[in-house]
Amino acid sequence: MLIAGVVAAVVLVLGLALILLYNAMVRGRNLAEEAWSGINVQLRRRHDLVPSLVSTVQGYAVHEKDVLSAVAGAREAGMKASGGSAHDVGEAEKGLSLAIGRLLAVAEAYPELKANENFLQLQHALSDLENEIQMARRYYNGTVRDQNNRIMQFPGNIVAGWFGFARMEYFELSDEGEAEVPQAFPSAREGR
């Protein structure tokens, strides 16, 4: 009778631990998915801002068709990658960041454009948006780190294997320098 009571207590404790670990993994996965949704919202806002920026620059820099079409192509690639893996989205957004940086560098050669109020507002909005994307990326990567720790540590790794929880991808940029807010927005910062 005593042995049956001990076995029942051990089974109860193990069952409770299993339930707690499983629920923690579900909660972690949901937080990471919510954080990824936050990144997607910011990226969509960025994609929506790009045509206005291109249109404004196009009015002044008519000879820069290659740069303008590169930005449009990079925006299209970013929109197509949306909903894909963190790696695919990161690569597409890296291309868009580089194209926008080239566009803003070209804009430096046009004094009338640099003085245009609409262009300055767009630069400011883009700079703010880049900061928000960086914050959303940090939050997402933090939730992914916590979830990955939960499913890789013992005994969570056993529970994760039973219930199909897999490691999640970080949203990373390929280059350390790209992890910072782009410095191609001097006019927007000076205008604050």
Image (cartoon, rainbow, N blue to C red):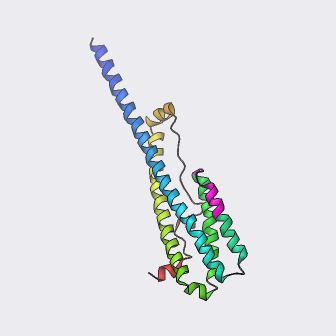
The vertical placement of 10 against 95, above or below, is above
Q: Residue at x 43, y 40 (%)?
A: 26
Q: Name the outermost residue toward the bottom.
A: 111
Q: Residue at x 37, y 27 (%)?
A: 15
Q: Is residue 167 visible?
A: yes
| x and y percentages locating residue 51 in the rendered image | 61, 70
| x and y percentages locating residue 140 in the rendered image | 47, 54
Give the extent of the magenta segment.
75-85
The residue nearer to you, when weighing 53 against 135, is 53
| x and y percentages locating residue 173 in the rendered image | 57, 60
Q: Name the outermost residue toward the top.
A: 1
The number of numbered discs placed on residues in the rendered structure image is: 0
Q: Name the outermost residue toward the left.
A: 2
| x and y percentages locating residue 148 in the rendered image | 48, 45
Q: Residue at x 44, y 56 (%)?
A: 139
Which quadrant, please, contains the C terminus? bottom left
Is residue 86 toward the left or the right of residue 9 in the image?
Answer: right
| Magenta stretch secondary structure, dominant | helix
Q: Residue at x 43, y 34 (%)?
A: 155
Which quadrant, please, contains the N terminus? top left
The vertical placement of 27 against 93, above or below, is above
